[in-house]
Amino acid sequence: MEDLLDHISQEIYSNSYVVVDNFVDEAFRMALLKEQTDLLNQGQFTKAAIGKGDQKQVRAEIRSDEVLWMDPTNLSPLQAIFWEKVAEVQQVLNRRCFLGLKSFEGHFARYPIGSFYKRHLDQFHAVPHRIVTLILYLNESWTEADGGQLRMYFPQEDGSERVEDVLPLGGRLVVFLSEEIPHEVLPTQKERISITGWLRNID
């Protein structure tokens, strides 16, 4: 685990993002996916919104996913284990990248068939405290034909952009600097499940 954490911190320091396969083992992924399914069946998910506070609104033309925020004071046993794994990432990023990370917020994210999230940044005027984005995919299986890729945009010196698409493979973790990398979720052809969250510089 120490080598993996070192790899994450080095890639964030050098490239502002990293993709890690098999961040969690298969049994843990399956357990989290089952928990998500149970919570969904209980009607716990809501339509995702954009903005903050009084500006918060559901805009289906921008994003059409559903979310369930996790309560840090009332985590399930599985969620608590995931929180501990994130805390290890937080510690190494603070130690190696000096990011001043203090807390984590996260939610289950469900993209039904045909849903998407248009290009955006995770840190903007309404949420200035998000420093690092983490996404853990929980999907059972995935192919290119299933869509739902995370598309990240990287500005180049000549003014163009490099585009990288990441398949939401189960157990895969994506970490990137929230302020630096515009991204979107391409339309998905089957249900797409993840835990998405942000390491912040506030308590």
Image (spheres, rainbow, N blue to C red):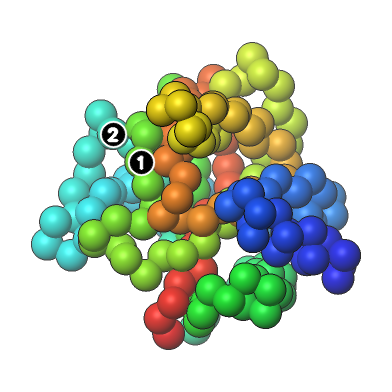
Closer mark to the observer between disc 2 and disc 1: 1
In front of the other: 54 or 73? 54
The amino acid at mark 1 is His
The disc at residue 120 is 1
In this rendering, is residue 187 above or below 65? above
In this rendering, is residue 77 above or below 63? below
Side of 174 relative to 123 (left or right): right
Residue located beneath label 2 in the image? 62
- Label 2 sits on a secondary structure element that is loop
In front of the other: 200 or 59? 200
Q: Label 1 near label 2: C-beta < 8 Å?
A: yes
Residue ID at (75%, 48%): 20
Residue furthest top as drawn: 145
In front of the other: 11 or 26? 11
Disc 1 crowd rating (10 Å Cα; few below 14, some 14-19, many 20+) is some
Residue ID at (37%, 70%): 129
Q: Residues under labels 2 and 1: Cα distance?
A: 9 Å
Side of 27 relative to 56 (left or right): right
